[in-house]
Amino acid sequence: YIITIPLVLLLWLTLPDVRQPKRQGVKFAVAGFLGSIFWIGIFSFCMVEWATIVSNSIRVPIAVAGLTVLAAGTSVPDLLSSVIVAKQGEGDMAVSSSIGSNIFDVLVGLPFPWLCFTLSQGKDVEVRAESLGLSIIVLVLMLVAVITTVKACNWRMTRLMGYSMFVLYVVFVVQDLLRQLPRGNPTWNMNF
């Protein structure tokens, strides 16, 4: 708790507590929502910048940090909310939340900043990815594997499904990390 005191104090000072009876209303709810979005943006920016600095410091490719640390860090809140609603017997809501948040990321989270950049700068955003086509193929194959696994488990969340999903995630991470390895000199010199 001591480590989080600065963050909690900052949020307490800048966001209205809509649980209090005198702060229950549309204007406080909207202010709390917009303030929360603002802080999520600030924290996300800091997280990406710090992950980049740490990756460069220990000579780990930034894509590796993005695939592992950043992806896990942004998925933990989804995981926790899905576990909570699943324990309440709302399995559909848990799955829908997980899928919906990823769809939102792809259809709003990526294009909205690009749209803002395009509107403010008057030029297009160039997306550079050497193996974008292969990544899309892998994504589609993983989606087919997930749907096949769910169907094979009779649309029930079983222990076998959990293990299968974990194995699929490990396969995805390993193949993506192998594609990120340096091409010319396959060894990494890590001087500490």
Image (cartoon, rainbow, N blue to C red):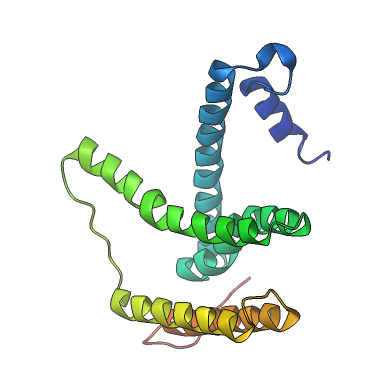
Is 129 positioned to the left or the right of 70 in the image? Answer: left
In this rendering, is residue 113 above or below 26? Answer: below
What is the quadrant of the N terminus in the image? top right
- 174, 16: nearer the viewer: 16
**The quadrant where residue 173 appears:** bottom right
> Can the viewer see residue 54 in this picture?
no
Is 52 positioned to the left or the right of 134 in the image? Answer: right
> Residue at left 69%, top 34%?
7
**Looking at the picture, how far across and down is residue 160, in whole percent?**
71, 84
> Residue at left 65%, top 52%?
77
Q: Residue furthest right?
A: 1
**The quadrant where residue 134 appears:** bottom left
Q: Which residue lies furthest to the left in this view?
A: 122
**Looking at the picture, how far across and down is residue 105, in whole percent?**
44, 54
> Residue at left 53%, top 64%?
55
> Residue at left 35%, top 75%?
136
- 33, 87: nearer the viewer: 87
Is 140 positioned to the left or the right of 33 in the image? Answer: left
What is the quadrant of the C terminus in the image? bottom right
**Looking at the picture, how far across and down is residue 96, in whole percent?**
56, 58
In this rendering, is residue 188 above or below 5? Answer: below
